[in-house]
Image (spheres, rainbow, N blue to C red):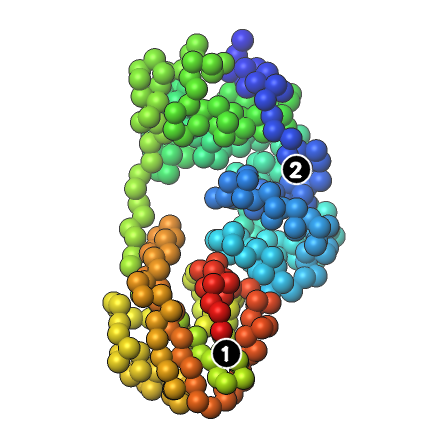
């Protein structure tokens, strides 16, 4: 029995009952794929259900305000995915009359849709013979065929895509692609896979060569940068605070935050007072203190944010202040959401 038939047999016996498996609606398939990028199924499932309920069609999503989408996305991270999703919804409605394009090449022209997502939508929704290659697929293919090329190298990406095309089952492409990804998620797991009961153990090169733990290979390209964030949580006597929108490109674009002072290292109260004066922020301070005595280290893929929340109580009223009771309605990074939930006025 060939590789693809083994995958299909395993999938038909072991597939999870996931809501996007019961539809060929390209909107719902696309939505699930965007949400599940760099996100585990258990974490992404509630978000998928929320989005389908709030925006049941691509037209509903296209008509939504970005602020509403970001609020619903809050906690998933990689917020560019949500912004790209909104852009694509408007593209589908305005340029394709609300119907997703049916071909790989057309799908790839949509914002935030790369090789993997285009292949997934084309094959699952339209039965196009396109091989999907995601992290799970890289792992299965590299181990079974004993491929020691880095998956994030130009050579490796091209090689694995070609290999995936060669071994795919074109007659049952929808189930095969989903089965291969499911196999990597449940059977050929990153750590401690159950090789003894694996239906592919008969020909797995990594198992034969005892290199399961070494494959797949990946180049370490990410250099982690340290940044020091100081959020100024202003509070006047009417329990008003200041909140601003991050408009510059980068992490958390268009999300809201407390006024931010970024420094080159951890700073003390005296330094904060001086920075407040230089930044033309409210200076009628009655008290100033750290909410968290030690910086909270928020780890992102390419940077670690050493964060301190400074509570700044004021003797006079704030101009353009926002009632503290209303700030939960704003889309904010999860780091700030956790502070809001824990801080008691």
| Residue drawn at 26 percent across, 74 percent down | 268
Secondary structure found at label 2: helix
Instruction: Give residue 322's position: percent from left, percent from top.
Output: 55, 79
The circle on residue 41 is: none
* Tag in front: 1 or 2: 1
Dividing the picture into quarters, in which one does residue 174 lie?
top right
Near-viewer residue (263 or 93): 263
| Residue drawn at 61 percent across, 46 percent down | 46
Question: In the image, is residue 255 above or below residue 29?
Answer: below
Question: In the image, is residue 33 above or below residue 335?
Answer: above
Q: Give the Cα distance between marks 1 and 2.
A: 42 Å
| Residue drawn at 57 percent across, 36 percent down | 119
Left or right: 62, with 199 as reference point:
right
Q: Which residue is mark 2?
A: 20
Question: In the image, is residue 107 above or below residue 172?
Answer: below
Instruction: Give residue 9's position: percent from left, percent from top.
Output: 59, 16
Q: How many marks?
A: 2
Secondary structure found at label 1: strand
Near-viewer residue (250 or 186): 186
Dividing the picture into quarters, in which one does residue 126 lie?
top right
Q: Which residue is mark 1?
A: 241
Mark 2 Cα-neighbour bin, 10 Å: few <14, some 14–19, many ≥20:
some
Left or right: 253, with 124 as reference point:
left
């Amino acid at each position: 029995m060939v590789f693809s038939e083994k995958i299909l047999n395993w999938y038909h016996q072991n597939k999870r009952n996931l809501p996007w498996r019961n539809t060929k609606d390209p909107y719902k398939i696309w939505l699930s794929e965007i949400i599940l990028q760099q996100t585990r199924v258990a974490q992404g499932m509630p978000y998928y259900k929320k989005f389908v309920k709030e925006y049941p069609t691509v037209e509903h999503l296209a008509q939504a305000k970005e602020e509403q989408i970001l609020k619903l996305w809050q906690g998933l991270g990689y917020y560019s995915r949500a912004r790209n999703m909104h852009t694509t919804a408007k593209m589908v409605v305005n340029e394709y009359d609300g119907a997703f394009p049916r071909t790989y090449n057309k799908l790839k022209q949509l914002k935030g849709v790369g090789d993997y997502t285009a292949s997934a939508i084309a094959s699952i929704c339209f039965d196009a013979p396109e091989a999907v290659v995601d992290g799970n697929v890289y792992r299965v293919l590299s181990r079974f065929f004993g491929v020691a090329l880095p998956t994030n190298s130009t050579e490796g990406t091209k090689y694995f895509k070609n290999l995936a095309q060669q071994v795919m089952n074109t007659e049952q492409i929808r189930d095969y692609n989903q089965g291969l990804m499911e196999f990597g998620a449940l059977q050929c797991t990153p750590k401690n896979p159950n090789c003894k009961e694996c239906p592919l153990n008969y020909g797995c090169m990594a198992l034969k060569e005892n290199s399961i733990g070494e494959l797949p290979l990946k180049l370490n390209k990410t250099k982690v940068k340290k940044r020091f964030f100081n959020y100024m949580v202003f509070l006047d006597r009417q329990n008003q605070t200041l909140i601003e929108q991050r408009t510059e490109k980068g992490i958390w674009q268009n999300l809201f935050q407390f006024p931010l002072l970024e420094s080159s290292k951890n700073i003390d109260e005296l330094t904060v007072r001086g920075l407040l004066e230089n930044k033309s922020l409210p200076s009628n301070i009655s008290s100033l203190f750290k909410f968290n005595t030690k910086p909270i280290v928020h780890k992102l893929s390419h940077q670690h944010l050493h964060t301190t929340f400074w509570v700044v109580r004021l003797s006079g009223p704030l101009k353009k202040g926002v009632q503290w009771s209303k700030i939960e309605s704003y889309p904010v990074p999860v780091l700030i959401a956790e502070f809001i939930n824990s801080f008691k006025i």
